Amino acid sequence: MSIQSKHFLNDPETLVVDSLQGLCAVNPQLGLDVETKVVYVANQDRSKVALICGGGSGHEPSHAGFVGDGVLTAAVCGSIFASPNPAQVRRGIDLVENEKGTVIIVKNYTGDILNFGLAREQYSATHPDKADRVKFVIVGDDVAVGRTQGKIVGRRGLAGTCVVYKIAGALAKRGADLDEVYSTAQWVASRVGTIGVGLEHCHVPGTAASESHLGPAEIEIGMGIHNEPGHRRLSPIPPLRDLLPQLVEFLTLTNDPERSFLPFKNDGSDRVVLLVNNLGGTSELELASVAGEARLALEKKGVKVERLIAGTFMTSLNMPGFSITTLLLPNGAEAGAPDSSLLLSLLDEPTNVPGWKWSSNVPPPAADQIASGIQKTVSATSEEAIIVLRSEDPQAFNAAVERACKAIADAEPEITRFDNIAGDGDCGLTLKAGAAAILKGLQEGRISGEDVTKSVITVAKVAEEQMGGTSGALYSIFFSALAQALQANNAGAQTVSPGLWSTALSSALTKLYTYTRARPPSRTLVDPLAAFIEKLASTKGGDFAGAAKAAGDAALKTRDLEAKAGRSAYVEGDRLREEHVPDPGAWGVKVILENLLG
C-alpha cells in the first residue's frame, strides 16, 4: 500500500520558512528571524520568565504554533524532522533575553538535547553571570518504549510536551519566578504519558514516494512521530471500543517493570487530564470518536477525567493516526508536588496562540448525563385520520418489499463503485442503510401489505432518518407525497388497485418536481423513476413489467448522458465518459423496481 505522497508547496527546500512566514501573517503578535528560523513574541514582557521550545519541523502546530501570550516566548525550528543547530538555538536565547531567566523545554530526542544543550552551555560560557538563569527541561512521555530500550535511547518526547509548556507558560505569565516555573515544568514532565497509534507512515516532502510497511487492515501501536517503528501491530483494525482500552492499559500499568512509568494507583482515586491528539491525517469526525472512547476507557478503569482536550497539537506531517496523553494529577499527599487545582487553573488559563485548542475548562459530563436535547413536541396527529388501504395481495406486497431490500444490499458494492467515480462514494451505503431499516420495519410489522398507507409513511420516515443526504430527502419527499396521493385518490376503495398505484405515483412525481430541478434526461435517479411512472400511467397501471423495463433502460442510458443535476454534475465530464458508468442513484432505482416485480 503506497503512502500518500502529494503535497501543497512551492519547493521542499523553502517549505519550512514559507510556513513560518504564513504563521506570522496569521498571528501578527509574532516576529520571525528568517535566517535562523526562530519565531518569537515581538513585544515580549521582559519582566517575566521566557519559555523556549523547538526541534525539527513537520510536527505543526508544535512548536511555532504555540508561540504567543501565555505559552511559549520563542520556538526554534529545524528542517523537517531535523533538529536546529546550536547557532539557531543561541539566536533564540538572545531574542528572549529578559530579567528573570529562561526555561528551555525539549522533546527527548538525541539531536534536540545535544543542540539545545550545547547552545545553553555556550550561552553560559559567554555569560557566566547568567549561567544559572537558563534552565533545561527534557520531556520523554512515550510509554511505548520500555525501560530496557529506554536505557539506550530514552523515552521519546510526544504530545505530552504541549501540556508541559502550556502549564509552564501560564505560570510564567502570572509572574512566577524562574525556579517555580522550572520545578513545575519538571514535575509535569514526570507525570505525562503518551501512546500513539498509526494507520501508516507519513511522507516527507521532497523525498521519493514509498510503500507503507503496514498492510491495508493493519495498525501500529506506539509508532513514533518521525516514522519510528512502534511496539506492536494489530490486524484486523479493531473498533475504537476495543482499541482504546488497550492504549489506556499502556498508560495506567502499575506492576510491569518495563512499562510502569506513571504512579497510577488504580484504586478509583486517580485523576487525570486527557489530551487527544491528531497525528496529522485523521479527520475531525474520527478524532471526536477517539476522544469519547478514550474518556470511557479511562472511566472504566476507575480514572476520573478532570479535563478532556482534543485537537491537533503535535503531528507527524500527514500521518493518519492519533495519540492520547494523560497528565496524572497529584493526589494531595505528595511532597513537593504542585496543587492539582493550580495545575488545572494553569491549563484552563486563556491564551492567544493558534496551536492551543478550545477547552471547556470543566470535567466532561458522564456518558449517561450528556443532554439528549429538548424533548421533541410531536403534533397530535391521530392515527385514525390516516386512511387504511390494503394491498390486493398483502403477502405478495411483503415479499416484494423484502426482495427489493435484499437486492439493494447485494448491489451495494457495485453502486458504491459507480459512486466513487460519479459522485462522493456514499450512495451504495446510504441505500443499504435505508433497505436494512425497511427490512426491520417489515419484520416488526410496521410495514405490511395489510396497511399500505402506513407502510409508505414508514418508508418515508426511514428515508429521512436512516438515509440522510440528498437521496434520503428525495426518497422521503416522494414517499410522503405518495402516501398523500393514495389517500386523496382512493375514491372510497379499501384496497390499492393498479390504477390507484399509477395515479398516486404520477402525483408523487409531480410533487417531487417541486423540490428538484432534475428532469429526464438528467443522469439522476429521476430518469428511471420518471420512465417507470410514465410507462405505468400509459397502461393505467396494467404493465408493471414493461414499466420496470423502461426504468432499467433509462438507468442504463445514464452512462451516456451529461450530468445536469446531482453529484455527477460536479465531476469532470470527460472522466464520466471515459469510465462509462451509470448514475449510482439511477442504478439503485433500477434495482428496486426490477426486484419489486420478482
Image: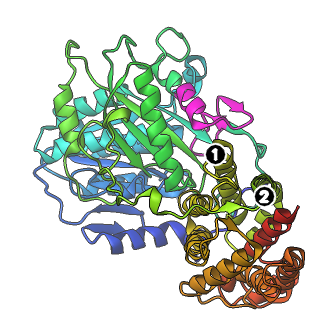
Q: Nearer the viewer, mark 1 or mark 2?
A: 2
Q: Is residue 569 left or right of residue 21?
A: right
Of 436 and 490, the residue lying toward us: 490
Secondary structure found at label 2: loop
Q: Is residue 29 left or right of residue 251?
A: left
Structure colour scheme: rainbow
**x, y percent for residue 506:** 67, 83
> Which residue: 40% across, 72% down?
21
**x, y percent for residue 541:** 79, 79
Please give the range of residues in magenta.
Answer: 220-247
Reply yes or no: does residue 336 show up in magenta.
no
The numbered mark at residue 393 is 2
Q: Are marks 1 and 2 in contact (CB under 8 Å)?
A: no
Looking at the image, is 356 positioned above or below residue 129? below
**x, y percent for residue 61:** 42, 56
In the rendered picture of this protein, how many numbered marks are placed on residues? 2
Measured Cα–Cα span from mark 1 to mark 2: 16 Å
Q: Is residue 459 left or right of residue 132?
A: right
> Which residue: 61% across, 22% down?
149
> What crowding class fits label 2: few (fewer than 14 Cα within 10 Å), some (14-19), or many (20 or more)?
few
The numbered mark at residue 445 is 1
